[in-house]
Amino acid sequence: MQVFIGASSVAIPRWTATTIFSLPLERVNAIATRISGSRDLVLGSYLLWSLTKDRRRIKLLSGIAALVNLIDAGSAIACGLEGSLPPELSRNTTIACGSWAVLALLAWF
């Protein structure tokens, strides 16, 4: 899922911003989506590429993915509280990033 979000954010940022993230169709939203999407694309691709039976490596990579998504969730909460992000978008982003963090941490079990 992270690879898909990253790839669509880089390749078609306006569609991703309006369809997936429910952002208004504005140039700044497409730019922000493309910037964050590149990180998701690289991180998700690296996680897929490094599928291995080495449990230590899986835990390290999934921990990094979880941390990145938890930072994004915290940023969405902070932006929502300060009013720079609409409440609905803040909530949706927090839920999405939190969910991705939980999915990443499932690799620890």
Image (cartoon, grey):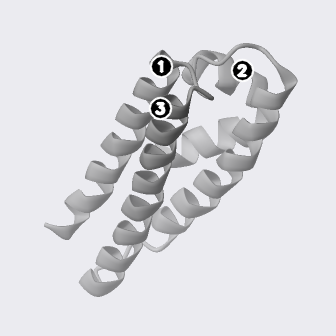
Residue furthest right as drawn: 27
Number of on-image labels: 3
| Pointer 1 or 3: first along the chain | 3
Amino acid marked by disc 3 = Leu
Mark 1 or mark 2, which is nearer the start of the sequence? Answer: 2
In this rendering, the answer to whether 48 lies above or below 82 is: below
Residue at the image point whose x is 25% and y is 60% from the top = 105
> Which residue is under mark 1?
87
Per the model, the C-alpha gap separating discs 1 and 3 is 8 Å
Residue for badge 3: 81
- Residue drawn at x 51%, y 22% is 89
Inspect the image, locate mark 1, and give the three-letter code of the amino acid beneath it.
Answer: Pro
How far apart are the two marked residues, 2 and 3, measured between alpha carbons? Answer: 26 Å
* Sequence-first disc among 2 and 3: 2
Location of residue 15 by image quarter: top right
Q: Nearer the viewer, residue 18 or 80?
A: 80
Image quadrant in which you'd find residue 13: top right
